[in-house]
Image (tube, rainbow, N blue to C red):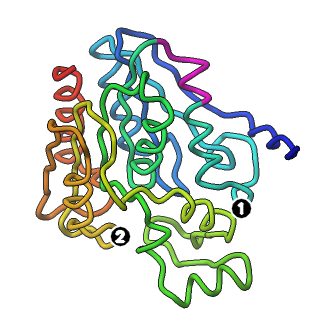
Amino acid sequence: MTDPAPPRPALAYHLTEGAGPAVIFLPGYASDMSGAKAVALERWAKATGRAYLRFDYGGCGKSEGAFEEQTLVGWRDDAIALIDQLVEGPVVLAGSSMGGWIALLVAKLRPERIAGLIGIAPAPDFTDWGFSIDEKMALLQTGRIERASPYADQPTIYTRAFWQSGEANRIMFGEIAFDGPVRFLQGQRDKDVPWTRTARLAELMRSADVQTVLVKDGDHRLSRESDIALLIRAVEDVIAAL
């Protein structure tokens, strides 16, 4: 017998009660539920009477746990646990960067619950294409690397455990079996996720209802007022298509 997985950390979250389908925001790597997009969607949900959930993955934001002990699968399981425990009925997932990858993994394991998807600069499989050969070797040899972050004063840390978890859960190798409405938002000045990868992801989605919006002057975060307006329209469009 294999030993049971250790319990996940206690998670911090904000749940807005309202009409379904509930919208759930999935943050990016080393991000949390206090970001501009997550908070803006909460304001929209409260104004429109929509059920909405934002939360922090284990080891992030206000949730318990050590960041360097987390993995992609652990964060996927955090999202699934909150869906199972807090939300009833169909769900629309809005994932930013790595959150877009987690959204796809959640949809694979909970196909009966996930009705629609929104990806903001979605970054599935970035443990493959987002690291140089030297970085991958350093991760394997030393167990961690640090990168200067354009978004914070402190460097961003990546661990061997996270990288290996990502490599074991790559999805962009064939058709992605999801049939609900999908909307992708992608900046063409994104220095982290090439817009061509999002175009390829759209091709791989089995659903016929997939739309990709390219923002010519958009960066990776897509957090300007105009970008957030696009995000809200994308969420509303997915809900209307259900």
Mark 2: which amino acid? Asp
Q: Which residue is mark 1?
A: 68
Label 1: how many residues lie within 10 Å, few (<14), some (14-19) or many (20+)? some
What secondary structure characterizes most of the magenta part? helix
Residue at left 14%, top 44%?
211
Tell me the quarter of the picture where residue 218 sits. bottom left
Name the quadrant of the C terminus: top left
Q: Position of residue 182 (x, y in %)?
A: 23, 38
Quadrant where the N terminus is found in the figure: top right
Identity, as a three-letter code, of the amino acid under mark 1:
Glu
Residue at the front extreme of this rendering: 1
Q: How many marks?
A: 2
Q: Which mark is residue 9?
A: none
* Residue found 50% across the figure and 69% down from its top: 127
Identify the element where label 1 is drawn.
Answer: helix
Tell me where the magenta segment starts and ends, as one range: 81-88
Image mark for residue 192: 2
